[in-house]
């Protein structure tokens, strides 16, 4: 059953060094405020799971929180490279990072399998590509009925799954709208879950009966974090800050400038 | 390049759109000769009709103008793997003579010269869509004899792997660059030049290609852009710049 927690307390209770932590959100509803709290609490040696490691992963990696990354597309969307990720991969700064590299179809299937409490996901994927040669988490499996060869990947079962959403009611039922990504699967697949929201309301408000709602009894912590997805966006609340994504290219290119940005905007800021 | 690429789409296609140049080409086609073209982005937006080009694969504009928006697992499992998409439109950092695509690394995987973003949705777009269109800038570093890493399968390292793996879809059918168009030769699956853009010569294409490129028996000239295509594309870029400030 969801407990209404502060950002500090939820992260302090659930995220510990060495854990596997998923922070998801497919372009939309990316949980930046929660990631910044992880940086402030100085967590280390995390295995980060994220389909599209973008600025949020660049910040966690550059701040020294991560030792491994499970992913399928790592870049600054529409802008270019992730310079902190590249620095960690190419020069081991501030720590070397192990990459476990997938394609989107496998990551999405692994989230579904995790939510379904299955040990692995099966998909018609990776045919003819070099990815299985660099990732031993991609295996071949034969269909027991047709003998067709298919790809198998382990289910995602992180210690903690963190996502952002538009709003929750006082029972902790959470509404997600717009591009809903893999957020529901992350909550269901993770041993413990934190959902940050723009606001808590008496009633979730007008919505269709098949709007995406995660019931409060399936969530561990609901945290109010206004603008908690910035610079990504929360549909109906604020737009994507495209200028910041462009500006990040310069901020992140240089270690000193990046560190100064983290000092000023993350370490110097107090959790909501 | 964008205009020539846009012409490769059929008006009744269901198209899985990559970001960047493919997105511009697909939306140009939708705004000109293919108004009923169905565009799908991997963020889960189906039948989207953006007024401006998205900066990312999941801009709010894509969701707002979509017929429906589904979860990412549903998109990849039921719609793409389910075989409901007629054409995939991809870009790449490297493309080789058998139309294999690399978006992973330049150089070796373990100590890359350039670490690229990675696979994203492309490997399964390349095998599950009924056919694949590719667009990229024509440079010797981009059109290479052999890609450093096969992120997405064209016809394989020898041109025969697609058939050997029993993949039933047609694979890459057309590559549009800023100089010319290329298509796989019938028996070898090697890309050969099928049309030159206006003002482009064979020597220029050869100089910009990283393998001894061959030309089809009959090489056409790409029809020049029409007034309508130019006007609509310029207007699309103007609106996009006004919104994204780029």
Image: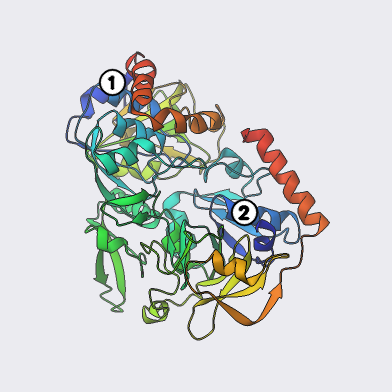
Disc 2, SS: loop
Circles 1 and 2, Cβ within 8 Å, touching? The answer is no
Chain letter behind tag 2: B
- Asked whether A39 or A187 is in front, the reply is A39
Left or right of A86, for residue A144:
left
- Asked whether A233 or A45 is in front, the reply is A45
User: x and y percent of residue B226 in the render?
Assistant: 80, 59
User: x and y percent of residue B229 in the render?
Assistant: 77, 56
Badge 1 density bin: few <14, some 14–19, many ≥20, Cα 10 Å: some
Residue B82 at least partly seen: no
User: Which of the image's four quarters has the C terminus of chain A?
Assistant: top left
**Image point 72% across, 61% down: which residue?**
B34
The residue pinned by badge 2 equals: B47
Q: Is residue B169 above or below residue A55?
A: below
Residue B6 at least partly seen: yes
Disc 1, SS: helix
- Asked whether A122 or B201 is in front, the reply is B201
The residue pinned by badge 1 equals: A40
Q: Is residue B29 above or below residue B195?
A: above
Chain letter behind tag 1: A
Residue extending farthest bottom:
B187
* Tags 1 and 2 both on a single chain: no
User: x and y percent of residue A24 in the render?
Assistant: 37, 39
Question: Image quadrant of residue A52?
Answer: top left
**Image point 36% across, 31% down: which residue?**
A195
Q: Nearer the viewer, mark 1 or mark 2?
A: 1
Question: Image quadrant of residue A16?
Answer: top left
Q: What is the distance, in whole Å, between disc 1 and disc 2 at their CAs?
A: 42 Å
Q: Is residue A170 above or below residue A176?
A: above
Badge 2 density bin: few <14, some 14–19, many ≥20, Cα 10 Å: many
- Asked whether B67 or A254 is in front, the reply is A254
Q: Is residue B24 above or below residue A268?
A: below
């Amino acid at each position: 059953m969801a407990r209404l927690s502060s950002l500090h307390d939820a992260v302090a209770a659930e995220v510990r060094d060495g854990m596997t932590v998923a922070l998801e959100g497919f372009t939309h509803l990316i949980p930046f405020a929660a990631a910044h709290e992880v940086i402030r609490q100085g967590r280390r040696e995390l295995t980060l799971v994220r389909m599209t490691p973008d600025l949020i992963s660049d910040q966690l990696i550059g701040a020294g929180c991560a030792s491994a990354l499970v992913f399928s597309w790592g870049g600054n969307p529409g802008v270019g490279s992730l310079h902190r990720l590249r620095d960690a991969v190419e020069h081991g700064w501030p720590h070397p990072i192990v990459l476990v590299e997938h394609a989107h179809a496998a990551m999405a299937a692994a989230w579904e399998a995790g939510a379904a409490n299955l040990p692995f996901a099966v998909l018609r994927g990776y045919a003819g590509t070099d990815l299985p040669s660099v990732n031993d988490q991609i295996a071949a499996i034969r269909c027991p009925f047709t003998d067709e060869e298919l790809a198998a990947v382990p289910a995602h079962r992180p210690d903690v799954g963190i996502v952002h959403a538009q709003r929750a009611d006082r029972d902790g039922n959470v509404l997600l709208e717009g591009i809903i990504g893999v957020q529901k699967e992350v909550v269901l697949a993770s041993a413990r879950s934190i959902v940050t929201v723009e606001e808590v309301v008496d009633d979730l408000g007008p919505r269709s009966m098949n709007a995406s709602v995660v019931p409060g009894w399936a969530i561990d912590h609901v945290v109010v974090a206004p603008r908690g997805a910035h610079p990504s966006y929360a549909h109906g609340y604020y737009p994507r800050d495209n200028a910041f994504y462009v500006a990040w290219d310069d901020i992140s290119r240089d270690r000193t400038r990046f560190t100064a940005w983290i000092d000023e905007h993350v370490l110097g800021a107090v959790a909501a | 390049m964008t205009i020539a690429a846009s012409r490769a789409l059929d008006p009744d296609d269901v198209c899985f759109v990559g970001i960047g140049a493919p997105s511009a080409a697909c939306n140009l086609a939708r705004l000109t000769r293919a108004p009923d073209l169905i565009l799908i982005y991997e963020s889960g937006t189906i039948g989207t009709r953006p007024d401006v080009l998205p900066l990312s694969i999941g801009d709010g504009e894509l969701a707002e103008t979509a017929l429906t928006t589904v979860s990412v697992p549903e998109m990849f499992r039921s719609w793409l793997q389910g075989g409901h998409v007629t054409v995939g439109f991809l870009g790449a950092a490297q493309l080789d003579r058998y139309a294999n695509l690399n978006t992973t690394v330049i150089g070796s995987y373990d100590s890359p010269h350039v670490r690229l973003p990675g696979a994203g949705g492309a490997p399964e777009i390349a095998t599950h869509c009924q056919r694949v269109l590719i667009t990229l800038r024509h440079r010797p570093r981009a059109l290479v004899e052999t890609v450093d890493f096969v992120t997405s399968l064209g016809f394989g390292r020898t041109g025969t792997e697609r058939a050997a793996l029993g993949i039933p879809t047609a694979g890459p059918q057309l590559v549009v660059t800023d100089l010319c168009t290329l298509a796989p030769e019938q028996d070898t699956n090697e890309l050969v030049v099928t049309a030159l853009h206006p003002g482009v010569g064979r020597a220029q294409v050869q100089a910009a290609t990283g393998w001894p490129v061959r030309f089809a028996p009959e090489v056409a000239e790409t029809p020049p852009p029409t007034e309508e295509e130019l006007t609509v594309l310029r207007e699309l870029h103007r609106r996009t710049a006004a919104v994204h400030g780029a």
